[in-house]
């Protein structure tokens, strides 16, 4: 197998596994289901990954992390209006991002809930996703404090954790109540952000 074809096969396995895991959860998605969806042989799967967990970690690091980076990190341009930037990021995540399906929630939040306590390796990989987002929000708020657009009493790291936990919660409520819960959340989220000024 050429290295180019092998890389394409590996990426295909990871992308198809991601879709299945997003819809069904990591633990309930079997290697056989992944193989059937990708139409690769079992030998090809195990050529690329020694087991399901190695594939799962690669999926987090090579599919989820780059995809989430755009939606979570790059969505905060630090252009001088931190309240607006954070609100727009959240609104985009909840209402505009075509990547997310309301009934399935957020793939990163789902994986944290399902796999963070499963093993140290999964915890570390998922922690990197969350920490990068937390740092981006924290930096946005710190920049806002430096320019006087965020209240000096604000603790950026604590606020970032609060925002992320609220996002995780509303993603889960959205699985039950649908899009209207996102609309209500965003209304109250905007009110909360305005208290940081």
Image (spheres, rainbow, N blue to C red):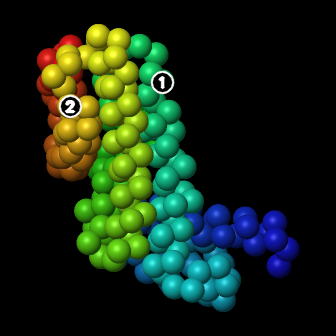
Q: Is residue 144 above or below residue 29?
A: above
Front one among 76 and 179:
76
Q: Quadrant of the N terminus?
A: bottom right
Residue that label 1 marks: 77
Q: Position of residue 185 (x, y in %)?
A: 17, 31
Disc 1 is placed on an element classified as: loop
Q: Position of residue 138 (x, y in %)?
A: 33, 34
Q: Position of residue 52 (x, y in %)?
A: 48, 81
Q: Quadrant of the C terminus?
A: top left
On the picture, is 9 further left or further right than 20? right
Q: Is residue 101 above or below residue 139?
A: below
Residue that label 2 marks: 155
Disc 2 is placed on an element classified as: loop
On the picture, is 11 further left or further right than 4? left
Q: CA distance from mark 1 to mark 2?
A: 20 Å
**Residue 126 in view of the camera:** yes
**Residue that appears at 42% across and 63% down:** 125
**Residue that appears at 35% across and 33% down:** 137
Front one among 122 and 59:
122
Badge 2: few (under 14), some or many (20 or more) residues near its Cα, within 10 Å? some
**Residue that appears at 36% across and 58% down:** 127
Callout in the foreground (1, 2): 2
Badge 1: few (under 14), some or many (20 or more) residues near its Cα, within 10 Å? some
Quadrant in the rendering for residue 30: bottom left
């Amino acid at each position: 197998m050429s290295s180019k074809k092998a890389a394409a096969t590996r990426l295909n396995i990871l992308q198809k596994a991601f879709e299945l895991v997003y819809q069904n959860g990591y633990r309930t998605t079997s290697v056989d289901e992944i193989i059937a969806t990708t139409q690769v042989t079992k030998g090809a799967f195990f050529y690329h990954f020694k087991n399901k967990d190695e594939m799962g970690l690669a999926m987090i690091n090579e599919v989820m992390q780059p995809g989430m980076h755009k939606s979570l990190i790059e969505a905060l341009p630090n252009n001088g209006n931190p309240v607006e930037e954070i609100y727009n990021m959240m609104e985009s995540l909840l209402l505009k991002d075509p990547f997310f399906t309301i009934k399935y929630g957020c793939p990163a939040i789902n994986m944290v809930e399902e796999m963070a306590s499963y093993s140290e390796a999964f915890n570390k990989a998922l922690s990197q996703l969350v920490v990068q987002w937390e740092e981006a929000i924290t930096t946005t708020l710190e920049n806002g404090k430096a320019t006087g657009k965020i209240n000096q009493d604000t603790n950026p790291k604590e606020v970032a954790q609060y925002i992320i936990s609220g996002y995780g919660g509303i993603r889960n409520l959205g699985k039950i109540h649908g899009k209207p819960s996102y609309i209500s959340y965003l209304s109250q989220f905007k009110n909360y952000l305005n208290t940081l000024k």
